[in-house]
Structure formats: C-alpha cells, structure tokens
Amino acid sequence: MHFLTGPSGAGKSTLMRLLYLTLRPSTGTVRVFGRDSELINRREAAEVRQRMGVVLQDCDLLDHMTVLENIALPLRIAGQKTNSLMQDLRELAAWVGLGHRLDAKPPELSSGERQRAAIARSVVNSPEVVIADEPTGNVDAAAAEWIMQLFVELNKLGKTVLIATHDMNLMRAAAGRKAYVLRIDKGRIERSGAPL
Amino acid sequence: MNPFRAVKEVFAPEETPIAPRSGVIGGLITLVALAMSFLAVIAFESGVAADRVAGQWAGELAQSATVRISADPDEIDSLGKAALSALQIAPGVASARLLSESELQELLAPWLGQQADVGALPLPALIDVTIEGTGPDVEDVQRQLDLVAPGAVYDDHGEWRAPLIDAAKGLRRLTIIGVALSIIVLGAMVGVAAVATLWSGEGVVRTLRLIGADDRFISSAFERQFALRAAIGGIFGSAIGILAMSRMPQITSSELLTAGANFGQGPTWWLVIATPIVCAFAAMLATKAASYFVLRSAD
C-alpha cells in the first residue's frame, strides 16, 4: 500500500494522470508496467487502463446506469457477458455496502455511496493495481473512514493500492499494514518510500 | 447484426446502452433520415421513370426511319410508289409502308384538328420504314431514292434520337446527384448530431476511457444508436416515398409527352430494404468520422 501525499497543488493528481495515461510527460520518462508511456499508443493505453482500477474524487459513474450496471461496466468493455456473473457482481456490491442499492442510479446515491460504487467498479475485473486520487475528497469523515477501510481490505487481498491524499489522518486507517509514503511538493519528490 | 434484435435494442434493450439515450437529437436523426430517404426515393423513382421514357423513345426512333417525298401533286403518287419499291428491296429494311391520307390527317390533327381536309393541302408523301438489324446504309439508300424519286429524303431520326439519348444520360446523372445529395445531407446531419452528443457527453467519454475503453468501443457505442435511428427513419421514409409514387396517376396515353413513365411501377420494393441500409451505413460512417475527430481533440 502506497500513499502519495503533499499539499494541494503539489502535483499529486498530475502524477496520477501520468500513471493512468491521460497525461503524457513533457520532460522525463514515466514507465507504466515496465513500458515507457511515450511509446504507448491510444489503443494500448486503453489496455493498460484495463489492468488498473482507477478511483477519482468525483466518482465518474454513468448517471443513466444503475449501481450494478456501473460496477459491471469494465467487464462489458473487456467484452465479457455480465449475465453469468450477476452473483459475483451482487457480492461485490454487498462488499462495498451497496447490496441494497443495486438498482439505484448514481444521482440517487450519497457521495459516500457513489464513491464506494466507484471502488467496486475499479476492482471488478481484478486489476493489478488500484489507483485512487483523493478518493475521500468529497465525503464526510465517517464515509471517508469506510472508504479507507475498503482500500485496506483490498490491500489485504493482495492488491497494490496507491492513494493520493493530502489528509494525513486518513493514512491512520492503514496502521498495521505495510505501507509507504511518497511525499511531493511543487512537483518535486521530498520523501520517497518511507514506511508509514 | 440481426435487424429485429437491433430494432429491439433501441426500443427495449436487454442491457442499458453504454451511450446515454440521445433524446431530442436521436429523434431529429430519425426525422432527418425519414425526410432524406423520402426525397431519395422520389428522386430515384422519378429519374428511373424519366429515363425509361427517354430510353423508350430513343429505342422506338432507332428502329424506324421516315422517307419524305416533296413533289408536284400530280407526280407525288408515282414517286411515292417508286420510292416504296426501292426501299422494299434495300438491305437492312424490314418493311416500308406509304402512309395513307387518314394517317396523315391523324398526324396533323393536334395542329389542324380532326375535321381538316388534308387532301387539299400540298403535303409531302411519307413512307414509314421499319429497320432490321443495324439498318440500311443511309447514303446508299439516299442514292437509290435520288434515282427513282428525286426530292425524296431519307430521315433515320438521328437528329431526334441524339437529344433524347443526351436527355436520358442527363436524367441518370441528376438521379445519381439527387440520391447522393440526400445521403450526404443525412451523413452531415448525423455527423453534427454525433459531435454535439459526444461533446455534451464528455463526462461519459472520460469515464469510459478511465475504465479501459478505447476509441473504437466509445465510437461504436454511439454509432449503433445513431445508425439504428437512421435505419428506422429510412424504413418509414422509403415506405412513404414508394407509397406516394405508387399513388401518382398512371400515364398511358400516347399523346402525352410523359407516356410510359408509369411512376411507382417496376421493381421498387427493394428500396424499402436498401434505403434503410444505406441510411444506417451513412449514419455509422458519419458517427465514426465525428468520433474520430472529437475523441482526438478531447485529449
């Protein structure tokens, strides 16, 4: 489990975007899954993103779909039939505490519920790494704690989790886990790989 | 794709479509496809009918010729008979027939009326010649006529046929242009609608990208919706167009210039199948092109 910390404007989101390839470096080199991001074309970038689970601050759920359909969306993109996976999808929704809201549409959910749906969606196709950029930025303290617990549980299940946050208190949720902190400020790394 | 499943997918999809319903824009695409396919069918049917008339006229003229004999009234009968004899043995002539006074009266009736006494007029004698194969050598026939009936002129209708053939070609071109313009306008409208939808659905595009969708997947999500809407518009537009053409009055009188046009007759049923397919294809291409530019510029 890795935390990317630093004050607002430090460049955390920029670094995250470089990792999930919606931004390319103007100088230097970014290697993603061992490949120079400059050499990854648009189609390959989509394949790379299928190997990641990305959770953003503003959730990015599709409002015209239900919670269950939103969670299943990466499977449809990967060309899988979701009908045979309904039981697994329901269990995943239940794991993030949305078992009772499967047919709700995102506008009907609270911000915490939306974020938990986004977390379920990010892991539905078993990504190699989960990247979360300020995942608790829009939720209250109780919801933030719940969300952090979900990430910790994912890490316990063997997933590499990288979370960008400026809230040091949230990192306490990972106490007892093998976690590292990367601190950046004004686009420069101040501290790299320090244990939590 | 099964067309029935495809239509069902628009109105009662099993899975929620990836692209949100395009609402008013989707309705407009159906309406534009309906209007354009209606116009395309009208242009096509009119062009085919007019082309058929021009072709029929040119064909009839090509299979016949006329010999006109101008002479003094007391000589005209003997010269007519001499010319007729020469024509009947000419190679390439199937038959030749001197027009009777009543036939001349019928020919002149539109100008002089049915009651005119054409016998009192200094009219030339006319011989109707039916041609076989490629027809006679015009110069040779004219030489023979000059010998037996001075003043006789062999007219192979070439002067009349040429503009008709040109007209037929022109009508074909106009039909193609009319149909092509309808398809282009439909494609342009769908393209504009696709650009508007993709820009307004920027959030959907960003989300899809974030979870691993490539441009092809995103584009096809919109393509399918627009192509199906265009196809539905095409079905109704072509059906209405064919119905409208079939209700046009059937013209059979040989006295009318448009005789033989017979709008709505002929093998037009296939337009109901072909037009929606063309509409869907045009819409799909337009959406693909619009997606290509929008998705790249949205980076």
Image: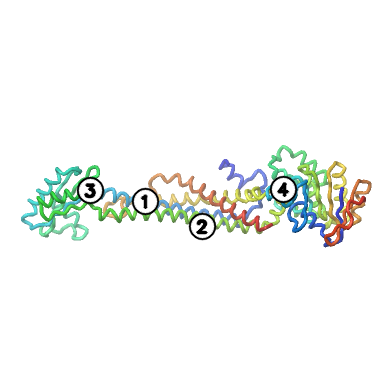
Which class describes the residues within 10 Å of circle 2: few (<14), some (14-19), or many (20+)?
Answer: some
**Which numbered dot is residue B185?**
2
Looking at the rendered structure, the secondary structure element under dot 1 is helix
Color encoding of the figure: rainbow
Disc 1 marks which residue?
B49
Residue type at tag 3: Ser
Chain of the residue where label 3 is placed in the rendered structure: B
Q: Earlier in the sequence, mark 1 or mark 2?
A: 1
Q: Are marks 3 and 4 in contact (CB under 8 Å)?
A: no
Q: Is residue B180 left or right of residue B1?
A: left
Task: Provide the chain ID for the residue under circle 2.
Answer: B
Cβ–Cβ below 8 Å for labels 1 and 2?
no
Q: How far apart are the alpha carbons under marks 3 and 2?
A: 45 Å
Q: Among all residues in the image, which is located at the extreme top?
A: A84
Q: CA distance from mark 3 to mark 4?
A: 73 Å
Residue type at mark 4: give it: Gly
Mark 2 belongs to which amino acid?
A: Val
